[in-house]
């Protein structure tokens, strides 16, 4: 029995709609964490990301940190590994940039892919990435449970410990 034309059109539409939902989810998160109009620094990062991540690849390729972010953003797992080990993470304002780049990669790659890549890293690297994203993500509103399970750091006040 051959499927009807309407069924094929419906199935194709469903596949397209499902793909768009993922893109839409990223766009909503991206707009939330990096608003175009804001008095805070996230606006500056948004402008930079819009220019560098949605255009052509950087001319220097993966040799620069921004090249690593670009390629990781577009699904290159080896670029993600190089990025999370980049020495800029410990260098003043470059470290701040590295933090925001971690966040944009989490938003773009999503919990499944990001956590799968982060799980391949050593504990120290997982904790550094955890500090970066835990200080920027509102976990009461947006959940990334697989990623968050990979590190111990938690931002915010700790629950009081009961005396032993």
Image (spheres, rainbow, N blue to C red):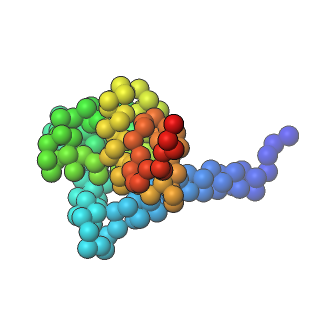
Q: In this view, does 118 lie above or below 19?
A: above
| Residue at 37% over, 48% down | 133
- Where does the N terminus fall, quadrant-wise? top right
Depth check, front residue: 44 or 10:
44
On screen, residue 105 versus residue 69, left or right, reads: right
On screen, residue 44 versus residue 20, left or right, reads: left
Is residue 79 shown to the viewer in this render? no
User: Percent x, y for residue 9?
Assistant: 69, 55
**Displayed quadrant of residue 31:** bottom left
User: Percent x, y for residue 37?
Assistant: 31, 74
Q: Is residue 24 above or below residue 53?
A: below
**Displayed quadrant of residue 71:** top left
| Residue at 48% over, 45% down | 161
Is residue 134 shown to the viewer in this render? yes
Depth check, front residue: 68 or 54:
68
Depth check, front residue: 160 or 104:
160
| Residue at 76% over, 52% down | 7
User: Percent x, y for residue 53?
Assistant: 29, 51
Q: Is residue 81 above or below residue 107?
A: above
User: Percent x, y for residue 137?
Assistant: 41, 54
């Amino acid at each position: 029995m051959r499927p009807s034309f309407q069924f094929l059109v419906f199935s194709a539409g469903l596949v397209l709609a499902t793909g768009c939902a993922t893109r839409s989810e990223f766009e909503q998160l991206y707009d939330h964490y990096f608003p175009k109009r804001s008095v805070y620094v996230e606006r500056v990062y948004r402008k930079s990301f819009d220019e560098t991540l949605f255009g052509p690849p950087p001319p220097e390729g993966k040799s620069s940190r921004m090249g690593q972010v670009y390629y990781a953003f577009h699904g290159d797992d080896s670029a993600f590994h190089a990025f999370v080990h980049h020495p800029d993470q410990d260098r003043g304002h470059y470290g701040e940039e590295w933090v925001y780049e971690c966040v944009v990669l989490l938003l773009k790659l999503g919990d499944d892919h990001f956590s799968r890549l982060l799980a391949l890293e050593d504990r120290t690297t997982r904790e550094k990435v955890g500090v970066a994203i835990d200080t920027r993500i509102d976990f009461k509103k947006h959940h990334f449970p697989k990623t968050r399970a990979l590190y111990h750091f938690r931002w915010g006040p700790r629950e009081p410990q009961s005396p032993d």
